[in-house]
Image (cartoon, rainbow, N blue to C red):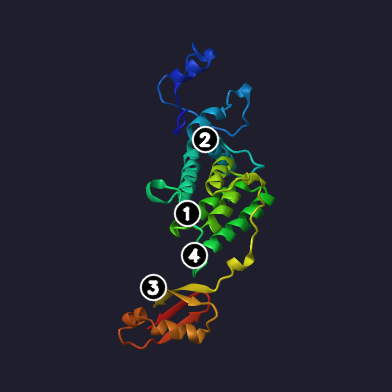
Amino acid sequence: INSANELNISKLRKWREEYTYVDVIPTEEPYIVSREVEKMSKSKYNVVSPDAICEDYGADSLRLYEMFLGPLEQSKPWNTAGITGVHSFLKKLWRLYHSGENGAFSVTNSPPSEGSGEDLKILHKTIKKVEEDIENFSFNTSVSTFMICVNELTAQKCTSRAILEPLAILVSPYAPHIAEELWEKLGNTKSISEVPFPKFEEKYLVESSKEYPISFNGKMRFKLVLSLDLSKEEIEAAVMAHEKTQAQLQGRTPKKVIVVPGKIVNIVG
């Protein structure tokens, strides 16, 4: 049966001997069939061997994919078409640690995200979510969180050991083989399965600034990062003094400036 639910009669006859001489009515192909979710069982001939998947994608991909399918307590349809996405994520995780020339391993001891602390925020947001998911057996959302984390750290071009080492520990219960190899490349001799889980620190998630959308008559024209400690009057003054605001106004005096601290700034007129 292909992805369009079309049954291949010739392959069915080869697969099951009892269908070799069966006449199928109607005789015109294609034969459209339906699907239903049921547990794997030898008696139903729907058991899928993991050996072929492990050979093509690796044990970590299979392990992650099984957790990514959905909540643990629910029955899920088995469709290996989606395993390529999880496999691609693991390759992206590997590249995060190998961002050097020609894919060389590249992890530095430099402080993470000097000045902004964005990398630390990404890491501790991930630690918090994964901790909650493990306690609730919500492994599928943990895998989604890892994907978001790796995408964000890749965008930040993170190479800091202070970030990538805890990340490897976080991933290790889900993808133990690749995590163990990365852990060894990081210079550790003790197994990653024996090290303590990273600790979540709330201070790294405290927001100190806000990227305000600056709108003119309800249409957003640009964004401006301002401190969350500023009052309404200080926010208005900073926005009005900005060169992009002056370019939009072209010497005009606005009728009204609407400021919602922590949300938006809208200049009317």
Q: Amino acid at mark 1?
A: Asn
Marks 2 and 4 close (CB-CB < 8 Å) = no
Pointer 1 residue: 151
Q: Amino acid at mark 3?
A: Phe
- Mark nearer the N terminus (2 vs 4): 2
Disc number lying in front (3 or 4)? 4
Marks 3 and 4 close (CB-CB < 8 Å) = no
Pointer 2 residue: 58
* Crowdedness near tag 3: few (<14), some (14–19) or many (≥20) residues, C-alpha within 10 Å: few
Between 38 and 118, the residue placed more toward the observer is: 118
Q: CA distance from mark 2 to mark 4?
A: 33 Å
What is the secondary structure assignment of the residue under circle 1?
Answer: helix
- Residue 240 is situated, as x and y percent measured from the top left of the image, at 40, 84
Q: CA distance from mark 3 to mark 4?
A: 24 Å
Disc number lying in front (2 or 3)? 2
Q: Amino acid at mark 4?
A: Ser
What is the secondary structure assignment of the residue under circle 3?
Answer: strand
Q: Amino acid at mark 2?
A: Gly
Q: CA distance from mark 2 to mark 3?
A: 46 Å
Disc number lying in front (2 or 4)? 4
Disc number lying in front (4 or 1)? 4
Q: Which numbered disc covers residue 113?
A: 4
Q: CA distance from mark 1 to mark 3?
A: 24 Å
Residue shown at 39%/73% (left/top)?
A: 222
Marks 2 and 3 close (CB-CB < 8 Å) = no
What is the secondary structure assignment of the residue under circle 4?
Answer: loop
Q: Which numbered disc covers residue 222?
A: 3
- Mark nearer the N terminus (3 vs 4): 4
* Crowdedness near tag 4: few (<14), some (14–19) or many (≥20) residues, C-alpha within 10 Å: some
Q: Is residue 98 above or below residue 21?
A: below
- Mark nearer the N terminus (2 vs 3): 2
* Crowdedness near tag 2: few (<14), some (14–19) or many (≥20) residues, C-alpha within 10 Å: some
